[in-house]
Image: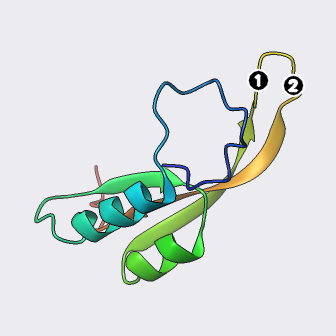
Amino acid sequence: SYFPPTLGTKNKLYAHVLSAADHKRMLARLNKIEGKVFLCGYSHPDYEQALRGWRSHEFEAATVMGRNEVAALRIEKCWMNYRLEKTK
């Protein structure tokens, strides 16, 4: 999930983009879910506050903002409200 303005104003890659108010409503609802939640996006103060106490992991990811634009490296972040289980 990408909090505005991280996608830019001329974004044509996504059919639906959440507004800042949509993101805030989503974050409020995520904390009420009793099941497992895994969310990816870019770090943002609203996310950091709402998802405090969740586990998170940051990593570099190549991004492309359009067909003719060069890919750039950005730091993506994943949040989860559960502990990962080890597999054999």
Where is 80 relative to 51, above or below?
Answer: above
Q: What residue would you read off at disc 2?
A: 69
Task: Judge left or right: residue 30 versus residue 52.
Answer: left
Q: What residue type is labelled 2?
A: Glu
Within-10-Å neighbours for mark 2: few <14, some 14–19, many 20+: few
Q: Is mark 2 on a helix, strand or loop?
A: loop
Q: Position of residue 8 (x, y in %)?
A: 72, 43
Please give the label number shown on residue 36: none
Separation of residues labelled 2 and 1 (CA atoms): 5 Å
Identify the element where label 1 is drawn.
loop
67 relative position to 11: left or right:
right
Q: Where is residue 44 in the image (x, y as percent from the top left)?
A: 59, 69
Residue 20 visible (yes or no): yes
Name the residue type under label 1: Gly
**Mark 1 — residue?**
66
**Figure check: 77 above or below 8:** below
Taking the spot 40% from the left edge, 54% from the top edge, the residue there is 39
Decide if residue 49 is on the left or right side of residue 62. Answer: left
Residue at 23% from the left image edge and 64% from the top image edge:
29
* Vertical position of residue 42 compared to residue 50: above or below: above
Query: Vertical placement of 24 versus 37: above or below?
Result: below
Direction from residue 86 to residue 13 in the image, left or right: right
Residue 82 in sight in this render: no
Kindly check if marks 2 and 1 are in contact, taking CB atoms under 8 A apart as contact: yes
Residue 25 at x, y percent in the picture: 32, 63
Q: In which quarter of the image is residue 26?
A: bottom left
